[in-house]
Amino acid sequence: MEETTPGTTAGTAGESGGPAGDASSRFGKAKDYARDKYDAASDAMKDQYNRMRERVDDVDFGAIADQVRSYVRSNPGKALLISVGAGFLIGLLLRRSGDED
């Protein structure tokens, strides 16, 4: 009969085929997989954030505001109907989210 000491590989739970070693191995693999997926998602979000930030930096909001002002002055009826419609839709959306409570 061969005796194993606590320091040998034959008797340790982490390296044997026992349930504790198997669970530990699965947990380690799952942790590594989750970390890889998290890192990939984090990198993708950082890339998207940087792209959107560059797009927003390129937009001239003053020019857009001037275009909106001129459109409202030349088409006041349409502008009023658009704003009423948008307000109605926003009101419906907010009201429905409050009914679920």
Image (spheres, helix red, strand yellow):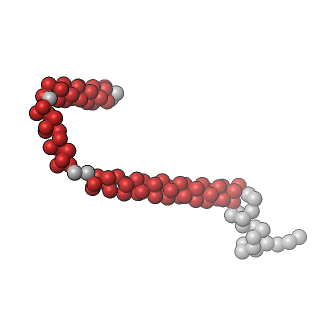
Foreground of the two, 30 or 59? 59
Q: How many labels does the image show?
A: 0
Q: Residue 97: percent from the left, percent from the top?
A: 31, 30
Q: Residue 56: percent from the left, percent from the top?
A: 29, 52
Foreground of the two, 84 or 68? 68
From this view, report whether residue 67 is shown above or below residue 52: above
Foreground of the two, 13 or 66? 66
Q: Which residue is drawn at 58% across and 59% down?
A: 32
Query: Splitting the image into 4 quarters, where does residue 42 fall?
Result: bottom left
Left or right of 21 in this view: 87: left
As drawn, the residue found furthest toward the front would be 74
Q: Residue 37: percent from the left, percent from the top?
A: 53, 54
In this rendering, does residue 78 appear at all? yes
Quadrant for the C terminus, please.
Answer: top left
Q: Residue at x 12, y 31 (%)?
A: 74
As drawn, the residue found furthest toward the right would be 1
Left or right of 62 in this view: 16: right
Foreground of the two, 56 or 13? 56
In this rendering, does residue 91 appear at all? no
As drawn, the residue found furthest toward the left would be 73
From this view, report whether residue 28 is shown above or below residue 70: below
Q: Residue 71: percent from the left, percent from the top?
A: 16, 35
Quadrant for the N terminus, please.
Answer: bottom right
Q: Residue at x 48, y 53 (%)?
A: 41
